[in-house]
Structures are given as structure tokens and as C-alpha cells.
């Protein structure tokens, strides 16, 4: 397993779950969405993360998360998500967002922090999706090499959202280019196997939680 020396820092946050047919109607700018669309492409990403979990077993239970996005502003008066999609940096409305399940992570931070995260997101406009960045995750941990990185003007969804979340006070335990979607789910203890109904979880970093699994 690769020896990472960076220390994860997180503000206090909550996690809420929404399954197919359910919709979050009260998200705020800067909230993070951990997503499984239930599509073929999500399955491919989850399979690659399952390979990664062979060398990083702490990811077991979190590879369900194949995509992440950040809440940023509105579109046509509706709450909008910003994400690195198949066509690169894109925005979609939360209303009608296609998903099998998603978890909404909301930090207890000031409005200015949320606006900073949204400004970081706006700065990513025009970037393309980094499909070729997934295989190096597993290769690096299995071999000890250091190939995981961004390629030109491409990044993956979890790199994008990690960089945005740094404006909220998050500091990752590895460089943003080495953060897979499952890693973000692990940070927030968002294991979908343990959730059968929508649940709110309040986490205070550094303090053991009774509902941590």
C-alpha cells in the first residue's frame, strides 16, 4: 500500500441519503454529492475502484460511489450541480437528477467559505474529463509507482470536487489528483450498504462517533 503522509482535515459535516425516486430539495452552495447513477459507466468506475481496494482495503464498502459533484448556484431558478461529466465541466439541476442513490454532504461553515468553493468550481470551467486517470490509481498502489496525475486540461470528478472542497476547509490525505470517488465516500463514512432509509449523520472530526461504521 502506498505510504501517504498528508493528514486529512475536515470541518464538521452531515451526511443525508437519497435513493432512486427521492430528491434533496434543500441543498446549499458548496454541498458535496456522492453519487451512483446506476449506469454502465458507473459500473466500470466501481470495478476499477474494487481493484484499487485490493491494495487499499479501507475502501471496502465505499466503492459504490462512482461520481461526485458540488452544488453551485442555480439554473433557470433551480438548484444546480456542477460536475466533471462525459463532456467535461458541466452543470445540471438537482431536480430530476438521474441517480440510483446519492449522499449529500454539508459542512458547518460560513457562507463566505461556500462562496469560495463555488469560485474554485467556476475556475474549472472548460476542463475536460480525465478518463485515462483511473487506471493509474490501482497501478500506483500495486507497484509503488507514481503515475496518478492530471493529464493536460483533464481532471476526474473527485479531483475537481476535492479542489473545490479545500475552500470549505477540507484538506485531503493525498494530492487531489490521487483522490478517487470511493476515497471521498470513505472520508465522510458514507457506506451505502449500511443505509436502507434516508438518514442524517452528524460527524465531528476527531471525536469518535457512535454511528461510525
Image: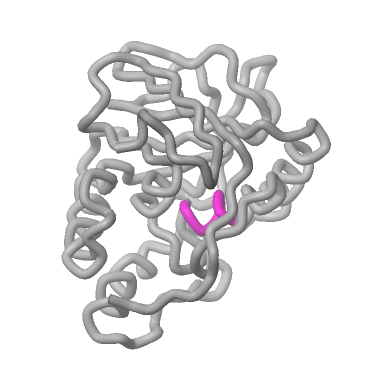
Q: Is residue 100 magenta?
A: no
Residue 125 in picture, x, y percent from top left: 66, 51
Residue 105 in picture, x, y percent from top left: 51, 32
Residue closest to the eye, 87 or 116: 116
Residue drawn at the location 36% of the way across and 29% of the way down: 211
How many callouts does the rendering have? 0
Residue drawn at the location 20% of the way across and 46% of the way down: 43
Residue 23 in picture, x, y percent from top left: 44, 14
Quarter in which the N terminus is drawn? bottom left
Which segment is the magenta one? 158-162
Residue drawn at the location 24% of the way across and 64% of the way down: 52
Q: Is residue 15 above or below residue 181?
A: above
Q: Is residue 156 above or below residue 19?
A: below
Residue closest to the eye, 183 or 57: 57
Magenta portion: prevailing SS class: helix
Q: Residue furthest right?
A: 112
Residue drawn at the location 38% of the way across and 22% of the way down: 17
Locate residue 166 relative to residue 69 in the image: left or right.
Answer: right
Residue closest to the eye, 207 or 66: 207
Residue closest to the eye, 76 or 161: 161
Quarter in which the C terminus is drawn? top left
Name the colouring of the figure.
Answer: one colour
Amino acid at each position: 500500500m502506498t505510504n501517504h503522509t498528508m493528514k486529512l482535515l475536515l470541518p464538521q459535516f452531515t451526511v443525508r441519503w437519497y435513493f432512486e425516486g427521492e430528491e434533496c430539495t434543500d441543498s446549499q452552495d458548496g454541498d458535496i454529492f456522492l453519487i451512483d447513477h446506476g449506469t454502465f459507466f458507473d459500473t466500470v468506475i466501481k470495478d476499477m475502484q474494487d481493484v484499487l481496494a485490493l491494495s487499499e482495503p479501507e475502501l471496502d464498502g465505499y466503492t459504490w460511489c462512482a461520481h461526485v459533484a458540488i452544488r453551485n448556484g442555480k439554473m433557470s431558478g433551480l438548484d444546480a450541480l456542477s460536475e466533471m461529466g462525459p463532456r467535461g465541466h458541466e452543470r445540471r439541476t438537482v431536480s430530476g437528477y438521474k441517480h440510483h442513490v446519492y449522499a449529500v454532504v454539508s459542512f458547518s461553515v460560513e457562507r463566505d467559505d461556500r462562496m469560495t468553493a463555488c469560485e474554485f468550481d467556476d475556475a474549472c470551467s472548460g476542463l475536460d474529463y480525465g478518463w485515462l486517470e483511473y487506471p493509474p490509481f490501482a497501478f500506483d498502489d500495486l507497484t509503488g509507482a507514481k503515475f496518478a496525475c492530471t493529464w493536460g486540461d483533464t481532471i476526474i470528478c473527485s479531483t475537481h470536487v476535492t479542489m473545490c472542497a479545500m475552500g470549505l476547509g477540507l484538506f485531503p490525505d493525498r494530492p487531489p489528483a490521487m483522490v478517487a470517488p470511493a476515497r471521498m465516500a470513505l472520508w465522510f463514512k458514507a457506506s451505502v450498504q449500511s443505509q436502507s432509509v434516508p438518514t442524517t449523520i452528524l460527524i465531528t472530526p476527531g471525536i469518535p462517533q457512535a454511528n461510525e461504521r
